[in-house]
Image (cartoon, rainbow, N blue to C red):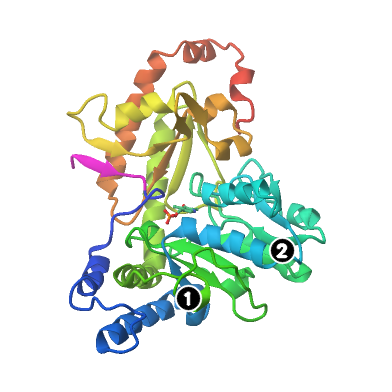
């Protein structure tokens, strides 16, 4: 077994060697500035950037000229939301989003509220993490200028009913943005079928480089306009100034191209690995609860709550801090360490998962380079770790003795 096993593909992914290979020439031989109009160095860089636009547009069914390059999905979410809110402030000031969005959306919305640029409705989700499109409809007012709902959630993998929401947005003439970061390159996307007007994605979640992302902005039917958040040389049709990260763009596009060619096969393979992991764990342990949607979820996502243990203790047992002689397993817990306290995940909270169960959750993120051997090993380690921790848990003892722990399970799905 390897010394380290990576199962945190929602946080980031290793770069595919074929992506690195495509990028390498653009660090040295083809180092030109894509904005240099006077010589072949600039022309070659511009050609590479434009080819990359075609590839990415092809993956989502948009037009090449509608792709804006920027530093990642965080910047993309910021530009989409702030750009629309500021440009259309005379039309209205209301934004609709969901409680389980990534912080790049939630914190952007909070910043607009603080500056009194916008009023924001944060829609609740059901116990599987889905937004109800009818609630989107009901939240719309005469002031609504933007709806932003993510394609797939980064913690629980739940896929949102984007095309239903898109139909409502279109009917009401409201712009619709989706943070597609986790679904881009993993599930088929067609911006027209989904009815979205803006779409955010990033390279490093699809085996591409970090620090390079995109915002796709519809140019016709309707044309979406944005207030730039970074001013400078007027690059990217004035929407995002700054010298383009040519090697990063080439890498992102190569990653997108591979994702398109291999999507169906990869989906099958990763899905089978996840099912194998889930079957092994739940076959051996009781009181394990799935967080998120049972079927409408990312193939590589398995988010489980292991009742009566602390997710953090479990992480220590898995990540090598407890025993450095064992292979280190990289997964995430559903709690976020903020300075002194351990806050349960706001996403799990929004699903109605009680604090106790939220604290016991582990996110397994499977991807391209995981193997069956790794899955089997991780399952084995998880099982023995949970059994060990439960032996130390007085609550687990009580439950086994038949004492009612209703409060413990507030909100849990049985
Ligand atoms: C990773 C992620 C982001 C942030 O992307 P960066 O490129 O790292 O800025 C935004 N939204 C979602 C859903 C993500 O998973």
As drawn, is 387 to the left or to the right of 101? left
Name the image quarter holding residue 356: top right
Residue 349 x, y percent position in the rendering: 60, 35
Compared to residue 309, the image places residue 68 above or below, namely below
Compared to residue 40, the image places residue 398 above or below, namely above
**At 32% from the left edge and 57% from the top edge, which residue is drawn?**
368
Q: Is residue 38 visible?
A: yes
Residue 213 x, y percent position in the rendering: 42, 64
- Magenta range is 2-8
| Disc sitting over residue 234 in the figure | 1
Residue 258 x, y percent position in the rendering: 34, 70
Label 1 SS: loop
| Disc sitting over residue 89 in the figure | 2
Q: Earlier in the sequence, mark 2 or mark 1?
A: 2
Question: Is residue 7 in the magenta section?
Answer: yes
Name the image quarter holding residue 413: top right
Q: Quadrant of the C terminus?
A: top right
Cβ of mark 1 under 8 A from ligand 1: no
């Amino acid at each position: 077994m390897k010394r380290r096993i990576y199962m945190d593909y929602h946080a980031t992914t290793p770069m595919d060697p074929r992506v690195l290979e495509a990028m390498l020439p653009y660090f040295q031989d083809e180092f030109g500035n894509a904005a240099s109009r006077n010589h072949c160095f600039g022309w070659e860089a511009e050609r590479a950037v434009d080819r990359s636009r075609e590839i990415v547009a092809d993956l989502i069914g948009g037009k090449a000229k509608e792709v804006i390059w920027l530093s990642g999905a965080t910047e993309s979410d910021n530009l989409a939301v702030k750009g629309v809110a500021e440009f259309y402030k005379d039309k209205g000031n209301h934004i609709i989003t969901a409680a389980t969005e990534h912080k790049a959306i939630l914190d952007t919305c909070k910043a607009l509220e603080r500056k009194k640029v916008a009023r924001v409705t944060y829609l609740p989700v059901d116990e599987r993490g889905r937004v109800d499109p009818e609630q989107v409809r009901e939240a719309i007012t005469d002031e609504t200028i933007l709806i932003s709902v993510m394609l797939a959630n980064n913690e629980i993998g739940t896929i949102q009913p984007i095309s239903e929401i898109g139909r409502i947005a279109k009917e009401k003439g409201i712009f619709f943005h989706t943070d597609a970061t986790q679904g881009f390159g993993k599930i088929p996307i067609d911006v027209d079928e989904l009815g979205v007007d803006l779409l955010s994605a990033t390279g490093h979640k699809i085996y591409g480089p970090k620090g390079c992302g995109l915002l796709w902005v519809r140019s016709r039917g309707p044309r979406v306009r944005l207030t730039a958040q970074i001013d400078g040389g007027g690059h990217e049709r004035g929407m995002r100034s700054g010298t383009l990260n040519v090697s990063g763009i080439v890498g992102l596009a190569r990653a997108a191209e591979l994702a398109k060619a291999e999507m169906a096969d990869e989906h099958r393979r990763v899905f089978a690995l996840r099912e194998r992991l889930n079957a092994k764990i739940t076959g051996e342990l009781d009181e394990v609860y799935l967080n998120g949607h049972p079927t409408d979820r990312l193939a590589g996502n398995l988010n489980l709550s292991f009742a009566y243990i602390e997710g953090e203790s479990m992480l220590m047992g898995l990540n090598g801090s407890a025993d450095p002689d064992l292979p280190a397993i990289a997964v995430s817990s559903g709690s976020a360490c903020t300075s002194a306290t351990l806050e349960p995940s706001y996403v799990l909270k929004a699903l109605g998962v009680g604090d106790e169960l939220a604290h016991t959750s582990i996110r397994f993120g499977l991807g391209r380079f995981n193997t069956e051997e790794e899955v089997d090993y991780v399952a084995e380690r998880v099982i023995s770790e949970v059994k060990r921790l439960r032996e130390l848990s007085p609550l687990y003892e009580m439950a086994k003795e038949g004492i009612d722990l209703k409060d413990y399970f507030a909100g849990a799905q049985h």
